[in-house]
Amino acid sequence: MISMTQRPYSSAILSIEDEAELVGRVKAGDQAACARLVKLFGPQMMIVARRFMQCDDDCNDAIQDAFPGADLRAWEANGWCEFDLQLADMPRPFRAHELSDGTLKYICLLAVFMGYRLPPFIALNEPETSLDPSLLAPLARLIVKASGRADIWIVTHSEQLMEALRSESSVPLRRVIKAKGAPTIEGLTLGGEYRDEEPDEDDS
């Protein structure tokens, strides 16, 4: 199941500024930042790294959807997961520290949605941040596929991501608005139902 809300403000646990700073420190080789990233995402990343190393068809399909003609290779070195990405139009593969923030983030999102055992509920705030617009449709397909194995709640500013999700899924998307000075979900009634939802046959 997917629930998606668009809103005009941010309240992430890890803010956009903190996220950008953390990624920048990791790429610069800051060991403390690396340790924090591993603490936040390490276990799930290692599961997906093993899956990449096994050349799983689903992982290959996800990479091809986002980066046509690319080849993501992963291996273990001294207890660490190493990987590089060979893009179709580049003469050599790029190691993790050479990739753009958006490409690295997309690979992390693969880790979120392609684990063998997904948590029952996944919530992401503004997953489109730092991503190239061309990655939003593949991201939507990734989210929709994962929604068959977990309940997913996405909060986004991106109309393009909303439209991509709408085209890939029949789940209604919800918009956060301000009503009488307070935030609320558009169409939500005091009884906890949405005005655009048809009543069950038993209730009619």
Image (cartoon, rainbow, N blue to C red):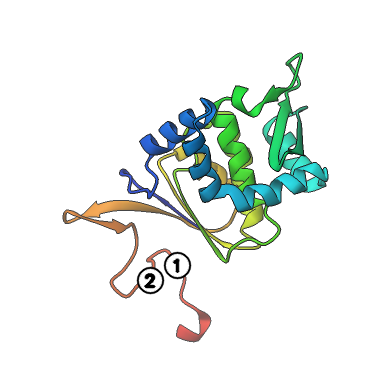
Residue 186 % position (x, y): 33, 57
Q: Which mark is residue 93?
A: none
40 or 144, which lies in front? 40
Identify which residue is drawn at 36% across, 35% down.
17
- According to the picture, the residue beneath numbered tag 2 turns out to be 193
Disc 2: CA contacts within 10 A as few (<14), some (14-19) or many (>=20): few
Pointer 2 and pointer 1: residues touching (CB < 8 Å)?
yes
Evaluate whether residue 81 shows in this view. yes
Identify which residue is drawn at 53% across, 28% down.
29
49 or 203, which lies in front? 49
Horizontal side of 166 relative to 176 (left or right) equals right
Horizontal side of 204 relative to 107 (left or right) equals left
Residue 144 % position (x, y): 62, 53
Disc 1: CA contacts within 10 A as few (<14), some (14-19) or many (>=20): few
Q: How many marks?
A: 2
Q: Classify the position of the C terminus by image quarter.
A: bottom left
Q: Residue furthest left?
A: 180
Residue 59 % position (x, y): 75, 44
Q: Residue furthest front?
A: 78
Dot 1: element: loop
Residue 130 % position (x, y): 49, 31
Tag nearer the camera, 2 or 1: 2
Image height of 70 relative to 58, above or below: above
Q: Residue 182's image quarter?
A: bottom left
Evaluate whether residue 143 shows in this view. no
| Mark 2–mark 1 distance (CA, rounded to whole Å) | 8 Å
- Residue type of the residue flagged with mark 1: Glu
- Residue type of the residue flagged with mark 2: Glu
- According to the picture, the residue beneath numbered tag 1 turns out to be 197
Dot 2: element: loop
